[in-house]
Image (cartoon, rainbow, N blue to C red):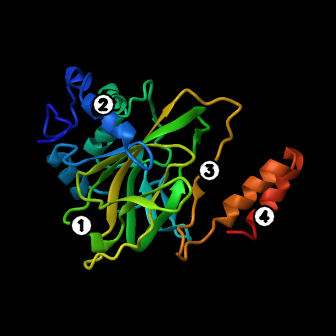
């Protein structure tokens, strides 16, 4: 039985009455988890919805889609739900932004007043190909368009029969990057939900090595609160190197941030533009 029941096998139709309390019994477990608040929930959605996602997973980038191929993000693609050809898939993502689902996320995390992202900035379907990875990082903290603060990630995996040796595990690291505290195999219909802060270091740094060349597929959803203020510093994704590895420093982002911090805006803008030509 799915953790989140649906009144329909073809869509995510959550009973609002069920959503009022679903997940409240998990809040203490979520808040006590190390290295930062999180939870892993198997059989998260009705299996029919997972199968539908797999059967209709996009094959080509959309106008808002993005492809990454650099040291920190190798062979990764993201697909914006608004451009999905399939109406049922678009409806599924819109349900993730609707009150019943958001309420369940609030119940589990204990964070009230969560705001979904109608723009799906960075969210949607994600896919990483063979040899690809996503280095350990802390996420961007500010949705500039809505001027809200990022608070919760919800990741739902779509990979059947995935084994540990295939790579792609989600790793959770402690604040000073001295210990990998948890490793999660991205099995189909497994959800990982966690609080995002400047120290919630996570990623899937182990390259995908599926013997049949299958890609690592997932759904990524981000939720915010209206707690952003001018005293906070807006940061993009902050990559961190694991000790004893060949992880590469993201000098492009680091340089841009240093120029912003130490130069007045009138000098920082041209300096950052010039630096971007040489540092990637």
User: Which is more foreground, mark 1 or mark 4?
Assistant: 1
* Residue in the picture at 11% in, 42% down: 1
Q: Quadrant of residue 31?
A: top left
Question: Residue 116 sits in which quadrant?
Answer: top left
**x and y percentages locating residue 103 in the rendered image:** 33, 27
**Where 104 falls versus 79 (above or below)?**
above
Q: Are marks 2 and 3 in contact (CB under 8 Å)?
A: no
Secondary structure of the residue carrying numbered label 3 = loop
Dot label at residue 236: 3
**Counting residues from the N terminus, which is met first, the one under dot 1 or under dot 3?**
1
**Residue drawn at the location 70% of the way across and 31% of the way down:** 230
Q: Which residue is mark 2?
A: 104
Sequence-wise, which precedes: disc 4 or disc 2?
2
| Count of labels in the image | 4
Q: Residues within 10 Å of mark 1 (few under 14, many from 20)?
A: some
Return the residue nearer the eye: 220 or 205. Answer: 205
Disc 2 residue crowd, few under 14, some 14–19, many 20+, Cα 10 Å: many
Residue position marked by numbered label 1 in the rendering: 162
- Say if 37 sits above or below 148 in the image: below
As drawn, the residue found furthest toward the left would be: 1
Above or below, 137 relative to 123? below
Residue 58 visible in rendering: no
Q: Could you tell which of marks 2 and 3 lies nearer the N-terminus?
A: 2
Q: Secondary structure at mark 4?
A: helix
Query: Counting residues from the N terminus, which is met first, the one under dot 3 or under dot 4?
Result: 3
Q: From the image, tell me which residue sits under label 4.
A: 275
- C-alpha gap between disc 4 and disc 2: 44 Å
Distance between mark 1 and mark 2 Cα atoms: 27 Å
The Cα–Cα distance between marks 3 and 4, rounded to whole angstroms, is 17 Å
Contact between marks 3 and 4 (CB within 8 A): the answer is: no
Residue at position x 78%, y 50% from top?
260
């Amino acid at each position: 039985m799915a953790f989140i029941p649906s009144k329909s096998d073809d869509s995510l139709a959550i009973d609002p009455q069920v959503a009022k309390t679903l997940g409240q019994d998990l809040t203490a477990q979520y808040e006590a988890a190390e290295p930062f608040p999180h939870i892993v929930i198997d059989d998260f959605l009705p299996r029919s919805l997972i199968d539908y996602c797999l059967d209709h997973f996009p094959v080509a980038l959309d106008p808002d889609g993005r492809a990454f191929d650099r040291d920190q993000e190798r062979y990764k693609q993201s697909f914006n739900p608004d451009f999905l050809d399939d109406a049922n898939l678009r409806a599924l993502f819109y349900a993730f932004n609707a009150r019943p689902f958001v309420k369940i996320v609030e119940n589990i995390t204990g964070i009230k007043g969560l705001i979904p992202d109608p723009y799906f900035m960075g969210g949607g379907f994600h896919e990483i190909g063979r040899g690809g990875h996503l280095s350990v990082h802390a996420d961007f903290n500010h949705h500039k368009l809505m001027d809200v603060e990022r608070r919760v990630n919800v990741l739902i995996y779509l990979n059947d029969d995935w084994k540990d040796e295939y790579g792609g595990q989600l790793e959770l690291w402690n604040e000073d990057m001295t210990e990998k505290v948890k490793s999660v195999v991205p099995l189909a219909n497994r959800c990982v939900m966690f609080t995002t802060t400047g120290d919630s270091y996570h990623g899937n740094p182990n390259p995908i090595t599926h013997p049949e060349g299958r890609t690592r597929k997932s759904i990524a959803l981000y939720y915010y609160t209206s707690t952003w203020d001018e005293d906070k510093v807006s940061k993009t994704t902050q990559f961190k190197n694991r000790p004893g590895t060949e992880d590469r420093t993201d000098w492009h982002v680091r340089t841009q941030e240093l120029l912003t911090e130490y130069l007045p805006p009138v000098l920082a803008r041209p300096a950052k533009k010039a630096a971007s030509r040489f540092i990637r």
